[in-house]
Amino acid sequence: MNAFSYWYVIGAALLPMSMASYSLIGEKVQKSLEPLLATPTTDEEILVGKNIAAAVPAVITTYLGAAIFMALMDWVSHGKLDYLYYPNWNMGVILLLLAPLAIIFSIGVNILISSRATDIRAAQQLGAFIMVPLAVIYVLSEINVISLTVTTLLIMAAAIFAADIIVIYLAKAIFKREEILTQWK
């Protein structure tokens, strides 16, 4: 069941992708980005706002889905196991560390792509590539190359945290209000 639990990391990264990839290029195409950039808000405030707007629905949906999944799996498996399988440490690490970090990473990468893309669909398709490493980890766990233990999940959380820090700094460096206002067509 730990492999099924890992899908909450993949799903958490998948949920905010379209909103985050639409955040800049979509608003530019719809002509709603220029008024936002003309306000006295800082670039960091704009980026934080776009992150929060994409993250909140993803977090709520992930936690709601996980609660339903755990309740149903406990209901189905209690007769065979004679104990409640969930909540456990693996699911705790997945829901409290990996899923939120995957959401932050997904949003950051998709905002980066959106800030440089010229087409909404291209931004969304490029943003989907972040799913590849997560899917590879799932496949490796299914073919018993790696085990999704708490230790492995914590190592993955540390790696995603480091990637989040890099993506945040890149987003701040790449997001240039003046360039968006003057050079984007």
Image (spheres, rainbow, N blue to C red):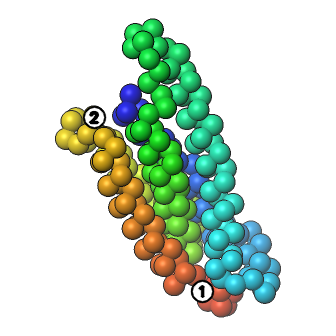
Which residue position is annotated with label 1?
176
Q: Amino acid at mark 1?
A: Lys
User: What residue is shown at x 23% (from left), y 42% (from top)?
Assistant: 146
Q: Say if residue 30 shows up in the picture.
A: yes
Q: Are marks 2 and 1 in contact (CB under 8 Å)?
A: no
The image shows residue 77 at horizontal and vertical percentages of: 45, 15
User: What residue is shown at x 39% (from left), y 14% (from top)?
Assistant: 81
Q: Which mark identifies residue 142?
A: 2
Q: Residues within 10 Å of mark 2 (few under 14, many from 20)?
A: few
The image shows residue 57 at horizontal and vertical percentages of: 67, 50
**Above or below — where is 14 with respect to 139?**
below
Q: Locate the N terminus and report the quarter of the image it occupies.
A: top left
In three-dimensional space, the C-alpha distance between marks 2 and 1, rounded to whole angstroms, equals: 43 Å
User: What residue is shown at x 22% (from left), y 35% (from top)?
Assistant: 143
Q: Say if residue 185 shows up in the picture.
A: no
Tell me if 40 is positioned left or right of 29 in this view: right
Q: Residues within 10 Å of mark 1 (few under 14, many from 20)?
A: few
Query: Regarding mark 1 in the picture, which secondary structure is present there?
Result: loop
Front residue of this view, candidates 173 and 177: 173
Tell me if 84 is positioned left or right of 139 in this view: right
Q: Amino acid at mark 2?
A: Glu
User: What residue is shown at x 57% (from left), y 48% (from top)?
Assistant: 15
**Above or below — where is 82 with respect to 87?**
above
Front residue of this view, candidates 23 and 93: 93
